[in-house]
Image (cartoon, helix red, strand yellow):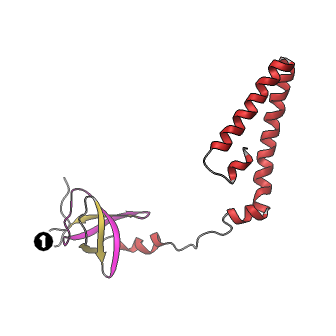
C-alpha cells in the first residue's frame, strides 16, 4: 500500500499501509510476547529503512521512474534574469496596483507590486527593486521623481 502511494497520490493508501504495519506489530506483541514483538518491530524498522534507500537508488532507473522524474535541468537563463535589467526603469501602470497589478515598461507587460499604497491605471511608476520574479514599483511624482515614502 505504501509503495502504491507513489502512483496514486492522496496519502490514503500510504496511511492504510502504515496502519496495517502498526496493527501487525501490535498483534505480534499480543500473539507471541514482548520479545517477538520487539524483534518484529526492529526487523520492520530495518527493512523499511533499507527498502526506502534501495527504492531511492533503483526507482529512477526503472522505465516508470524515468517517465515520472525530470531528467534535465532548466536552461541557465530564465525569465527572472531577463527582467533583472528593469531596476530603475520607468513605465505606466496598466491596471490598478492594489498592491499587485500589471505595468508596461517599453513594449513589455510586467506583473508588479506597489511598494506602498494604491496606484491607479495610467500613473507613471518606477521599478524600485526586484527579488526573483517579484518586481516592486513606486509611483512617480509629476516632476518625474519617485514619491517620497514615510
Please name whichever residue, 21 or 47, is drawn nearer the observer in this view of the structure: 21
Q: Is residue 114 visible?
A: no
The answer to if 46 sits in the magenta stretch is no
Q: Residue at x 78, y 65 (%)?
A: 63
Q: Which residue is mark 1?
A: 142
Relative to 83, is 25 on the left or the right? right
Q: Is residue 36 visible?
A: yes
Q: Residue at x 17, y 73 (%)?
A: 144
Q: Residue at x 68, y 62 (%)?
A: 68
Please name whichever residue, 29 or 57, is drawn nearer the observer in this view of the structure: 29
- Residue 8: image location, x then y, percent: 66, 52
- Residue 93: image location, x then y, percent: 24, 70
Question: Can you tell which quarter of the image residue 51 is in?
Answer: top right
Q: Residue at x 79, y 62 (%)?
A: 61
**Which stretch is magenta?**
107-133
- Residue 76: image location, x then y, percent: 56, 72
- The image shows residue 3, relative to residue 97, as above or below, that is above
Amino acid at each position: 500500500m505504501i509503495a502504491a502511494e507513489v502512483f496514486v497520490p492522496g496519502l490514503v493508501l500510504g496511511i492504510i499501509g502504515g496502519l496495517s504495519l502498526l496493527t501487525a506489530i501490535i498483534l505480534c506483541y499480543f500473539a507471541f510476547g514482548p520479545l517477538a514483538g520487539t524483534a518484529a518491530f526492529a526487523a520492520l524498522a530495518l527493512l523499511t529503512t533499507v527498502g526506502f534507500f534501495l527504492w531511492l537508488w533503483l526507482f529512477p532507473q526503472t522505465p516508470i521512474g524515468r517517465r515520472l522524474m525530470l531528467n534535465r535541468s532548466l536552461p541557465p537563463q530564465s525569465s527572472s534574469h531577463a527582467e533583472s535589467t528593469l531596476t530603475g526603469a520607468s513605465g505606466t501602470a496598466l491596471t490598478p496596483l492594489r498592491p499587485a497589478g500589471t505595468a508596461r515598461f517599453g513594449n513589455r507587460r510586467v506583473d508588479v507590486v506597489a511598494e506602498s499604497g494604491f496606484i491607479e491605471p495610467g500613473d507613471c511608476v518606477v521599478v524600485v527593486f526586484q527579488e526573483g520574479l517579484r518586481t516592486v514599483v513606486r509611483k512617480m511624482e509629476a516632476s518625474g521623481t519617485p514619491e517620497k515614502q514615510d
